[in-house]
Image: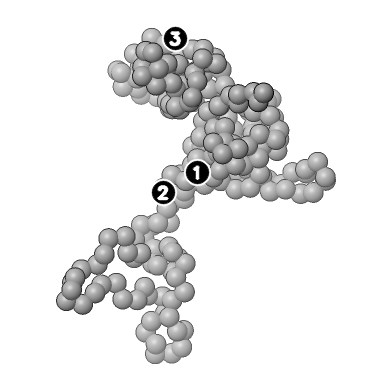
Amino acid sequence: METKKRVILVVGRKVGMAQIHDAAGNYVATTAIEIAPCPVVLVRTPGKDGYAAIQIAAEKTKTHRLSKAEAGHLTKQGCGPHRHLRELRIADSNDYVSGEILNVSSFKVGDLVDVSGTTKGRGFQGVVKRYGFEGGPKSHGSMFHRRGGSYGQREEPGRVYPGRKMPGHMGVRKRTTQNLEVLHVRPESNLLFVRGSIAGHNDGLIAVRTAKKG
Protein backbone atom coordinates (compact mmCIF):
# COMPACT_ATOMS: atom_id res chain seq x y z
CA MET A 1 0.00 0.00 0.00
CA GLU A 2 1.37 3.39 -0.98
CA THR A 3 2.12 5.68 1.94
CA LYS A 4 0.55 9.12 2.00
CA LYS A 5 2.98 11.91 1.11
CA ARG A 6 3.15 14.75 3.59
CA VAL A 7 2.67 18.21 2.06
CA ILE A 8 5.21 20.80 3.21
CA LEU A 9 5.13 24.58 2.77
CA VAL A 10 7.98 26.93 3.71
CA VAL A 11 8.89 30.52 2.82
CA GLY A 12 12.41 31.78 2.20
CA ARG A 13 14.63 34.05 0.14
CA LYS A 14 16.37 33.40 -3.16
CA VAL A 15 20.14 33.54 -2.62
CA GLY A 16 21.37 33.00 -6.18
CA MET A 17 22.53 30.32 -8.58
CA ALA A 18 25.49 27.97 -8.26
CA GLN A 19 26.97 24.85 -9.80
CA ILE A 20 27.25 21.65 -7.79
CA HIS A 21 28.21 18.07 -8.65
CA ASP A 22 25.55 15.40 -8.96
CA ALA A 23 26.00 11.73 -8.09
CA ALA A 24 27.63 11.07 -11.49
CA GLY A 25 30.13 13.88 -11.00
CA ASN A 26 28.54 16.23 -13.55
CA TYR A 27 28.07 19.95 -13.00
CA VAL A 28 24.42 20.87 -12.44
CA ALA A 29 22.96 24.39 -12.36
CA THR A 30 21.08 24.96 -9.11
CA THR A 31 19.32 27.74 -7.24
CA ALA A 32 20.07 28.27 -3.55
CA ILE A 33 17.14 29.21 -1.32
CA GLU A 34 17.62 30.34 2.27
CA ILE A 35 14.77 29.11 4.45
CA ALA A 36 14.54 30.23 8.07
CA PRO A 37 12.49 28.07 10.48
CA CYS A 38 8.77 28.48 9.73
CA PRO A 39 6.46 27.68 12.67
CA VAL A 40 3.01 26.25 12.04
CA VAL A 41 0.77 28.97 13.46
CA LEU A 42 -2.64 27.41 12.85
CA VAL A 43 -4.03 24.05 11.79
CA ARG A 44 -7.45 24.21 10.15
CA THR A 45 -9.75 21.18 10.12
CA PRO A 46 -12.93 20.47 8.15
CA GLY A 47 -14.94 20.04 11.35
CA LYS A 48 -14.04 23.45 12.75
CA ASP A 49 -13.18 25.59 9.73
CA GLY A 50 -14.87 23.79 6.85
CA TYR A 51 -11.61 22.86 5.12
CA ALA A 52 -8.18 21.41 5.91
CA ALA A 53 -5.17 23.71 5.80
CA ILE A 54 -2.04 24.79 7.61
CA GLN A 55 -0.93 28.35 8.24
CA ILE A 56 2.75 29.14 8.66
CA ALA A 57 4.71 32.23 9.67
CA ALA A 58 8.04 33.28 8.20
CA GLU A 59 10.88 35.68 8.96
CA LYS A 60 10.73 36.36 12.67
CA THR A 61 11.29 40.02 13.50
CA LYS A 62 11.16 42.47 16.37
CA THR A 63 10.56 45.69 14.50
CA HIS A 64 8.05 44.79 11.77
CA ARG A 65 4.80 46.67 12.16
CA LEU A 66 1.85 44.34 12.40
CA SER A 67 -1.81 45.21 12.31
CA LYS A 68 -3.78 44.64 15.50
CA ALA A 69 -5.47 41.63 13.93
CA GLU A 70 -2.15 40.04 12.91
CA ALA A 71 -0.48 40.78 16.23
CA GLY A 72 -3.44 39.40 18.17
CA HIS A 73 -3.57 36.29 15.99
CA LEU A 74 0.14 35.52 16.44
CA THR A 75 0.00 36.23 20.17
CA LYS A 76 -3.01 33.95 20.58
CA GLN A 77 -1.17 31.14 18.81
CA GLY A 78 1.91 31.61 20.98
CA CYS A 79 4.07 32.84 18.09
CA GLY A 80 6.19 35.98 18.05
CA PRO A 81 5.95 38.69 15.38
CA HIS A 82 6.74 37.52 11.85
CA ARG A 83 6.79 39.40 8.55
CA HIS A 84 4.76 36.92 6.52
CA LEU A 85 1.82 34.57 6.94
CA ARG A 86 0.98 31.90 4.37
CA GLU A 87 -1.81 29.34 4.26
CA LEU A 88 -1.86 26.12 2.27
CA ARG A 89 -4.92 23.95 1.73
CA ILE A 90 -4.17 20.26 2.06
CA ALA A 91 -6.17 17.05 1.96
CA ASP A 92 -5.49 16.09 5.59
CA SER A 93 -4.19 18.38 8.33
CA ASN A 94 -4.09 15.73 11.06
CA ASP A 95 -0.36 15.27 10.52
CA TYR A 96 0.36 18.76 11.86
CA VAL A 97 0.28 20.36 15.28
CA SER A 98 0.32 24.05 16.09
CA GLY A 99 3.83 25.19 17.03
CA GLU A 100 5.61 22.63 14.84
CA ILE A 101 8.67 23.99 13.04
CA LEU A 102 9.16 23.48 9.30
CA ASN A 103 12.60 24.11 7.79
CA VAL A 104 15.04 22.79 5.19
CA SER A 105 15.28 19.51 7.10
CA SER A 106 11.64 18.87 6.16
CA PHE A 107 12.92 18.09 2.63
CA LYS A 108 15.37 15.43 1.51
CA VAL A 109 17.51 14.95 -1.58
CA GLY A 110 15.42 13.68 -4.47
CA ASP A 111 12.16 15.35 -3.41
CA LEU A 112 10.21 17.28 -6.04
CA VAL A 113 9.01 20.77 -5.11
CA ASP A 114 7.04 23.64 -6.64
CA VAL A 115 8.72 27.04 -6.18
CA SER A 116 6.74 30.30 -6.46
CA GLY A 117 8.25 33.75 -6.79
CA THR A 118 7.70 37.18 -8.35
CA THR A 119 9.38 37.77 -11.70
CA LYS A 120 11.80 40.63 -12.22
CA GLY A 121 10.27 43.94 -13.31
CA ARG A 122 11.19 45.04 -16.83
CA GLY A 123 9.21 48.26 -17.02
CA PHE A 124 7.29 49.27 -20.15
CA GLN A 125 8.36 47.09 -23.08
CA GLY A 126 7.38 46.59 -26.71
CA VAL A 127 6.04 43.41 -28.23
CA VAL A 128 9.45 42.15 -29.43
CA LYS A 129 10.89 41.89 -25.93
CA ARG A 130 7.61 41.28 -24.11
CA TYR A 131 6.23 38.51 -26.32
CA GLY A 132 9.08 37.57 -28.65
CA PHE A 133 7.54 39.00 -31.82
CA GLU A 134 9.82 38.77 -34.84
CA GLY A 135 9.20 42.31 -36.02
CA GLY A 136 9.36 43.52 -39.61
CA PRO A 137 12.05 43.91 -42.27
CA LYS A 138 15.28 45.50 -41.04
CA SER A 139 16.10 47.10 -44.39
CA HIS A 140 16.44 50.85 -44.82
CA GLY A 141 13.12 52.65 -45.17
CA SER A 142 10.85 49.79 -44.06
CA MET A 143 9.63 51.80 -41.04
CA PHE A 144 8.49 48.53 -39.49
CA HIS A 145 11.41 47.21 -37.43
CA ARG A 146 9.99 46.39 -33.99
CA ARG A 147 6.31 47.16 -34.24
CA GLY A 148 3.40 44.87 -33.48
CA GLY A 149 1.48 45.24 -36.72
CA SER A 150 -2.24 45.87 -37.12
CA TYR A 151 -4.14 45.76 -33.81
CA GLY A 152 -7.70 46.74 -34.67
CA GLN A 153 -10.34 45.93 -37.27
CA ARG A 154 -12.21 48.02 -39.78
CA GLU A 155 -15.58 49.63 -39.20
CA GLU A 156 -16.88 46.36 -37.75
CA PRO A 157 -16.25 45.84 -34.87
CA GLY A 158 -14.23 49.06 -34.79
CA ARG A 159 -12.30 48.17 -31.66
CA VAL A 160 -9.38 46.09 -30.40
CA TYR A 161 -10.30 42.66 -29.07
CA PRO A 162 -9.50 42.03 -25.38
CA GLY A 163 -6.36 40.02 -24.79
CA ARG A 164 -4.51 41.35 -27.81
CA LYS A 165 -0.73 41.24 -27.29
CA MET A 166 0.44 44.86 -27.21
CA PRO A 167 3.23 46.92 -25.59
CA GLY A 168 2.86 47.32 -21.86
CA HIS A 169 4.25 46.63 -18.41
CA MET A 170 6.43 43.52 -18.25
CA GLY A 171 7.33 41.43 -15.22
CA VAL A 172 6.37 41.61 -11.51
CA ARG A 173 4.03 38.64 -11.82
CA LYS A 174 3.75 35.55 -9.66
CA ARG A 175 5.22 32.51 -11.41
CA THR A 176 5.49 28.93 -10.18
CA THR A 177 8.12 26.51 -11.46
CA GLN A 178 6.93 22.96 -10.91
CA ASN A 179 8.68 19.67 -10.20
CA LEU A 180 12.14 20.97 -9.33
CA GLU A 181 14.38 18.31 -7.83
CA VAL A 182 16.04 18.93 -4.46
CA LEU A 183 19.74 18.26 -5.06
CA HIS A 184 21.29 19.31 -1.77
CA VAL A 185 20.14 20.22 1.74
CA ARG A 186 22.38 22.20 4.10
CA PRO A 187 20.64 22.47 7.51
CA GLU A 188 23.53 24.27 9.23
CA SER A 189 23.15 27.17 6.78
CA ASN A 190 19.36 26.90 6.26
CA LEU A 191 20.01 26.42 2.52
CA LEU A 192 18.06 24.34 0.03
CA PHE A 193 19.49 23.71 -3.46
CA VAL A 194 17.05 22.90 -6.27
CA ARG A 195 17.80 21.99 -9.88
CA GLY A 196 17.43 24.79 -12.44
CA SER A 197 16.25 28.38 -12.18
CA ILE A 198 13.29 29.98 -10.44
CA ALA A 199 11.42 33.27 -10.84
CA GLY A 200 12.58 36.40 -9.10
CA HIS A 201 15.66 38.43 -8.24
CA ASN A 202 18.20 37.60 -5.55
CA ASP A 203 16.79 38.19 -2.04
CA GLY A 204 13.26 37.91 -3.44
CA LEU A 205 10.58 36.18 -1.37
CA ILE A 206 10.10 32.55 -2.38
CA ALA A 207 7.51 29.92 -1.40
CA VAL A 208 8.51 26.25 -1.59
CA ARG A 209 5.96 23.46 -1.32
CA THR A 210 5.76 19.77 -2.03
CA ALA A 211 5.11 19.25 -5.75
CA LYS A 212 1.45 18.85 -6.69
CA LYS A 213 2.25 16.62 -9.66
CA GLY A 214 5.33 14.91 -8.27
Q: Which residue is mark 3?
A: 78
Q: Earlier in the sequence, mark 3 or mark 1?
A: 3
The residue pinned by badge 2 equals 172
Q: CA distance from mark 3 to mark 1?
A: 31 Å
Image coordinates of residue 9 in percent, x first then y, are 53, 28
Tag 1–tag 2 contact (CB < 8 Å): no
Using residue 177 as the reference point, say whether residue 136 is left or right of it. Answer: left
Q: Is residue 15 visible?
A: no
Identified at 24% across, 67% down, the residue is 160
Residue under numbered circle 1: 176
Q: Quadrant of the N terminus?
A: top right
- Figure quadrant of the C terminus: top right
Q: Dot 1, how many residues are within 10 Å of its Cα: few (below 14), some (14-19), or many (20+)? A: some
Colouring used for the render = one colour
Amino acid identity at mark 3? Gly
Answer above or below: position of 73 versus 29.
Answer: above
Q: Nearer the viewer, mark 3 or mark 1?
A: 1
Picture quadrant of residue 77: top left
The x and y percentages for residue 208 are: 54, 34
The answer to whether residue 95 is above or below residue 154 is: above
- Where in the figure is residue 127, as x and y percent of width and height? 40, 67
C-beta proximity under 8 Å, tags 2 and 3: no
Q: Tag 2's secondary structure?
A: loop
The answer to whether one can see residue 50 in this image is yes
